[in-house]
Image (cartoon, coloured by chain):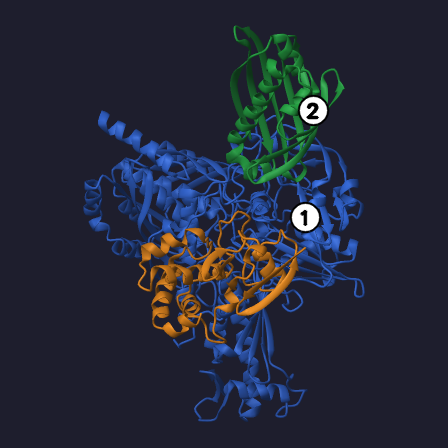
Chain colours: A green, B orange, C blue
Amino acid sequence: MAMTMTGEVVLPADRSIVWAALNDPEVLKRCIPGCEELQKISETEFQARAKVAVGPVKATFNGRVQLSDIDPPNGYTIAGEGQGGVAGFAKGGAKVRLEEVEAGTRMTYDVEATVGGKLAQLGGRLINGTAKKYADTFFANFARLVAPTEAGASPENA
Amino acid sequence: MAAVSMTVNGRSVTADIDPRTLLVQFLREDLRLTGTHVGCDTSQCGACVVHLDGKAVKACTILALQCEGAHVTTIEGLANGTELHPMQAAFREHHGLQCGFCTPGMIMTAVDLVNRKGSDVDEHTIRHELEGNLCRCTGYHNIVKAIAAGARAMAQAPLRQAAE
Amino acid sequence: MTATGIGAPVRRKEDQRFVTGTGRYVDDLNRPGQAYAYFLRSPHAHAAIRRIDKAAALASPGVLAVLTGEDLAADKIGNLICGWMIHSKDGTPMKAGPHPALAQGKVRYVGDHVAVVIAETLLQAKDAAEAIVVDYEVLPAVVDPAEAQKSQAQVHEVAPDNTVFRWHLGDKAAVDQAFARAKHITKLSLTNNRLVPNAMEPRAAIGEYDPGTDSFTLYTTSQNPHVARLVLSAFIGIAPEHKLRVIAPDVGGGFGSKIFIYAEETVCLWAARKIGRPVKWNAERTEAFLADAHGRDHVTEAEMAVDEDGRILGIRVSTIANLGAYLSTFASSVPTYLYAPLLSGPYDIPAIYCEVDGVYTNTAPVDAYRGAGRPEATFVVERLAEVTARQLGMDPAKFRKKNYIRNFPHQTPVIMTYDVGDYHASLEKALELADYKNFGKRKRESARRGKLRGIGFSSYIEACGIAPSQAVGSLGAGVGLWESAEVRVNPTGSIEVLTGSHSHGQGHETTFAQLVSDRLGVPIENITIVHGDTDKVQFGMGTYGSRSGAVGMSAIAKAIDKVIAKGKKVAAHVLEASEGDIEFKDGKFTVVGTDKSAAFGDIALQAYIAHKFSGQELEPGLKEGAFYDPTNFTFPAGVHICEVEIDPETGMTSIVNWTAVDDFGVVINPMIVEGQVHGGIAQGVGQALHERAVYDASGQLLTASYMDYQMPRAEDFPPFTVGMTVTPCPSNPLGVKGCGEAGAIAAPAAVINAITDALGHEDIAMPATPHAVWRAAQKSQMRMAAE
């Protein structure tokens, strides 16, 4: 079953910093809720492991994350697909656009996600809420990491 | 593993169990009291209803460890020896069961609802109170009749009730 | 009628164990040393399996085996089968794709069986299943039956356009002519919503292998253990028939879903031998939603032609039936021979033509569910009848009366020969019980409270007791549909009856004993009904299609006749009379015209001690068997009237009155028969108001638990008013017709006819949820305001 979501957030940082962060696996790993591992395996591909919970179903997903439509520093499309074993699968992507504004950088995102198996069967009615929560958490984490006061902090301290 | 002790149908039981064990699994697998049934995974069907300290609970919704020190009554503990509880007798008399799978939960729910709502409980209330118990065979018609009759019979057997 | 004989509302013998929690269902059984099976199921509706990595799972604690379709193929275990051959219009046989018990190369629906883990405990098996890594190549999926034949997705290579068959029945030219001269034609587009049977006991199996005797035992939740054994041995090849014992103990409801031979029991048996331990599997409810055979799922265009007097001239029907991803055991028969031959309903219709395309989709297999084909047919006929009557401005009851069949036997244009019935009698009685003449008053009273009241009829007929073996054989059945019985009289006069029927809620232990008690004069408590064990019962075709009374009990009656005949021979020796002078009545053998008699029990004892006759003259013992093959289907019929009240503000539909008048022929136990009617109505109302299995476009099942699939509950119903009329069935010795499916067949049309009546005739699809009814009510009110 599928869900879509769009949103935007204004980040108090220069576009170049935001763009760099969007391409930094360490930053992404710390922003993606439940992410336990994110390793760059090529310029555009990461190997990922994340714990996801939708309603009563919890699972560890193994999968790949791919970047496409890369247009520095204006944005890219990030897409991932993971198998959660008995819990089913999840795949999704987001088109992310960056735009300079007075207060920093406006990031707009257009998310599309699909889940299947037990996640859809038991978590189906919760999927929209859960996806929104995950997105909110991601962008809140991301905003914190790229904010000027924390930009210089080492990832370990964040 | 964790130790648990409780009283089930008047008998003290102690066991070492996986802390994840649900009460219904403990009853069925450890105590071999298989009258309490499992009909779903989401606490909707009510086939597993038992009495925990005198109140109806779905035994699939509670961990066995949470029942430490409690008194549990299952369908096997409802009759007085060979004499059926009035609610059991009413289900039989009014054909309130067909395949029998939902029946233990229905009867345990019914006894609890009479305890709460009294012996002159009306049809509408009975139907409403059965919202947590599913039956696929009877269309509920005879279950409702049986519970109304069982309720009256329970009032006429006050000694039995008090003994519980 | 005696207190326990035919016609008496005897309280059920089986209830003592069920009300005390001492019934024994499969999940209540444990075998020494048993291990547990857990199935890894496909999360995708359609995908190629590129690779299955089971190394980590095999290394998990407690794991005994991880098995896949490759292992199944290596052991040459055969595919699951569909036992009813349907030929398309062009004469080609149906296109049956391979159906392995564990997927081989491809998965075709969410819930399809990818691998099984066998472990010491269920939790260990589940944990290990998490560790299996399956590399899928996701393929396009098709879900909607109306789209299947146009879809890019191809479910099976053997079936281009996902078409299993293009079947038809009836005389197309005659129907075209009838429509050409019609005064009025009613056209409806109907969807028969997909349902999940949901017997309260989930399916379960324990497979066991004994190396000493090289034999298997299967404990399973089956409606027909002998058929399961036959299929598992002859087709799937688990073991030779005489080396496989199938036991179906107490079974918690079936409704058709436990007829079929599924992947899980096949795998449990096979795995039991592989690991040398009994293997137990018990379905979780979500697995039941995913992998039990579903029911219904038709998309239909239907037309009825009538003349200027309101007489039906013809019916034309075109249906696409969703058969799911694989053909289940009897899937192909349901939308064909159990459907189209019922399109005449109780009406005298000269011409009927029906086309059915059976299609594959990436959904769970669809097969028989309570009524199986007949509810779908009744919904078509009774929606057409109701809408036609309204469009002609005729009272719907009068329209039906005008078109009822009056003379029997009646040959319909679609195979069936109705033997007997009195449809007017049922309708008249139903109208009276429903207080039809005062409906207008009640409607006005509702209107004063701002509520919309409606009344709807369903005048159904069903063909059941299936059925004569020759007849079903000519229609494509792979088996004969007789039934067998053995009546074993013990020396002490107590009796065991071994029957091939199987009770999973129907109360056979009581009704069958009533028959025996009635015929032999033996107290009911001295009679035991034995069923559900292939090592005990000679053979049997099982219980479905409302056949246990008409076919199963008739077999018992036939065996009883043989017992009496043998008893007369024994009695002749004991009473020193000629056999021709012995009569048996009221439990006594009597020499006609004398007071010399011997009780049944005494003759039983004499038969076993064999002191009064020589072995050359007469064999000792008193035990007789019979196989009974009926001469026709039976044709129960009746009228259900549903009265609803709708709150147009919320769309809530309340059923305020339900009247059912059924003709089941001779009734053995009215209490049990009424119970069957109640249950059937509830399932039919569930279809009409609540239930629908929903797959999203990608094939994910969105209604996979009781949180999302709305089961009918006690509060959804009023008390039912049930009446009966009786025309004894001439085609079996008991005059019985069968009652198990009637309610589910009649109810959906009655509900929808009542709702559309209340709403001012807006059509509404099933399930008529509050949202759908509210929208229709808004539309209806807008239209009325405009007029």
- The residue nearer to you, when weighing C77 against C51, is C51
Q: Which one is in front in this view, the residue at disc 2 or the one at disc 1?
A: 2
Closest to the observer, C441 or C34: C34
Which label belongs to residue A156?
2
Q: Which residue is mark 1?
A: C38
Q: Is residue B123 above or below residue A67?
A: below
Task: Report the amino acid beneath label 1.
Answer: Tyr
Separation of marks 2 and 1 at Cα, in angstroms? 42 Å
> Relative to residue C710, is residue A93 drawn left or right?
right
**Left or right: where does residue C742 sit relative to residue C152?**
left
**Quarter of the figure that contains the N terminus of chain C:** bottom left
x%, y% of residue A147?
Answer: 59, 15
| Count of all numbered marks drawn on residues in the image | 2
Expressed as whole percent of the image width and height from the top left, the position of residue C319 reads: 49, 36
Residue C477 visible in the displayed image? yes
**Residue C101 seen in render:** no
The type of residue carrying mark 2 is Glu
The dot on residue C550 is none
- Residues beneath discs 2 and 1 located on the same chain: no
Question: How far from the left and from the top, in percent, is residue B47?
Answer: 50, 56
Q: Secondary structure at mark 1?
A: strand
Q: Chain of mark 1?
A: C
Q: Position of residue C227 (x, y in %)?
A: 63, 57
Q: Tell which subunit mark 2 falls on.
A: A
Residue A6 as seen in the image, left or right of residue C47: left
Q: Residues within 10 Å of mark 2 (few under 14, many from 20)?
A: few
Q: Secondary structure at mark 2?
A: helix
Identity of the residue drawn at 37% across and 31% down? C180
Residue drawn at (60%, 13%) of the image: A148
